[in-house]
Amino acid sequence: MNDPKILADRFPGDFVFGVATAAFQIEGATKMDGRKPSIWDAFSNMPGRVYGRHNGDVACDHYNRLEEDLDLIQSLGVSAYRFSIAWPRIIPEGTGPVNEKGLDFYDRLVDGLKARGIKAFATLYHWDLPLMLAGDGGWTARQTAYAYQRYAKTVIARLGDRLDAVATFNEPWCSVWLSHLYGIHAPGERNMDAALHALHFTNLAHGLGVAAIRAERPQLAAGLVLNAHSIHAGSDGEADQAAAARAFDFHNGVFFGPVFKGEYPESFLSAFGTRMPAIEPGDMETISQPLDWWGLNYYTPMRVSHDPAEGAEFPATVPAPPVADIRMDIGWEVFTPALGDLIRKLNADYALPACYITENGACYNMGVENGAVDDQPRLDYIAEHLGVTADLIREGYPMRGYFAWSLMDNFEWAEGYRMRFGLVHVDYETQLRTIKKSGRWYAELAGAFPKGNHRAA
Ligand code: IFM
């Protein structure tokens, strides 16, 4: 069961196996070399926002342990590393002067990957908006999209020659809905009007970012990473089925529609069209420029039922109970078929380019015992989701790679450091890294690639 050699045989030889992280979650060194605060520095320093008032000041101290961590990545046998670049290191005030020392850090990171034969998959935005921009409205302000475009251009001008792929955004669902409507992530807003503005200006920034990448490096593979939701109706009843369709439009359609069809979903526009910010001529064309790839981050399904409350706001859903009784330590339902259902549905609804699973993994908090971490449930989770990925390849879907979330335990946003997703355990007192059982298993699998049986062109 879960023999890495048997699993390896189910993938084409050029399938990319990687590990992923994000800047704010691992780097620490928040005040070093000219970096200025992001909205997450401010948010995590406010009482009641992040578990235990944990913050990113030290995190995994990756900024100061770069070489050691690059060796760690290499020791996992992976052929690619997905990381994010911190805007507050590059243009610390969001607009204004560029900080060369910030660029130097990512230069060393990318060169270190190249020297080790590892592909560099960079994400330009993984939620750490420079705090100064919040003073002008943050993502609810149109000018933030233009500030982002300049930042994107700056990064690609410096690093683009050595990147293998770049994503404009990681999970805009989180930086839009979770941050401006549900209030869980920075800046902690609970306001539909703010969220609708953040939605359109984030989509616009994505498009402006693609334009900047194309202008600087036309050959660089540009993409977008979405945490599309695998939405399942709580029952076969008509009301719940309709609720699931609305939820699909609200959670997925508002990103996939503009990017891959050049339009917001009709149901969404009829609910909120009058409250959206002005969509200026050319916006939808900018947003819907062709991409070379897209990334899916998948962890757990979303189950919804119709919300019978009078006047319930679109999408008018309430959570439906889980079907599977397996839960991660963070409480998320483990339901593997949802990954396949999601890829099939998205490809049926949109003309999608090649796909990488840019994040998948599980939260289990077991610690080190006698120098080892036995995290069999994480190993099983990853193996089973890779099994589904292999099925999708067999069915003809253009799945090109898989990145385990995460390389190592790290700052899990509103959950602080108490929730662990790493293949590598981090002792936050000593910064000792210990490769878990899942990490050793993944190294055996990933180490088999690239291999001879390449995909037919
Ligand atoms: O840790 C996060 C990551 O930053 C984005 N995707 C989901 C992960 C687990 O919650």
Image (spheres, rainbow, N blue to C red):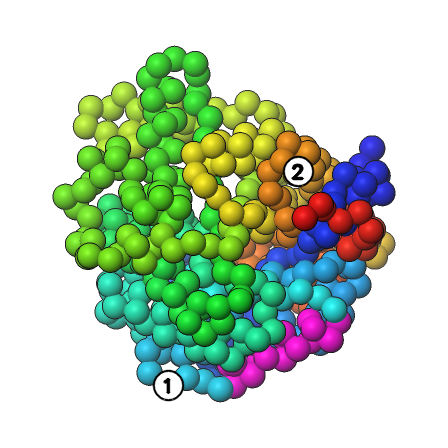
Amino acid, disc 2? Ile
Q: Residue under circle 1?
A: 97
Q: What kind of element bears circle 2?
A: helix
Residue 206, quarter of the rendered image = bottom left
Quick check: 76 left or right of 313? right
In the picture, the disc for residue 328 is none
Task: Give above or below for 162 relative to 449.
Answer: below
Q: Secondary structure at mark 1?
A: loop
Is most of the magenta stretch helix, strand or loop?
Answer: helix
Inspect the image, locate mark 1, and give the three-letter code of the amino acid beneath it. Pro
- The percent coordinates of residue 227 (x first, y second) are 48, 45
In the rendered image, the residue lying farthest to the top is 237
Query: Nearer the viewer's eye, disc 1 or disc 2?
Result: 2
Q: Nearer the viewer, residue 109 or 295?
A: 295
In the rendered image, the vertical position of residue 303 relative to residue 16, given as above or below: above
Q: Which residues are magenta?
A: 101-116
193 sits left or right of 401 in the view: left
Can you name the residue that lies furthest to the left here?
274
Is 107 in the magenta? yes
Point out which mark residue 393 bears.
Answer: 2
Crowd around label 1: few <14 · some 14–19 · many ≥20 (10 Å) = few
Q: Residue at x 39, y 33 (%)?
A: 248
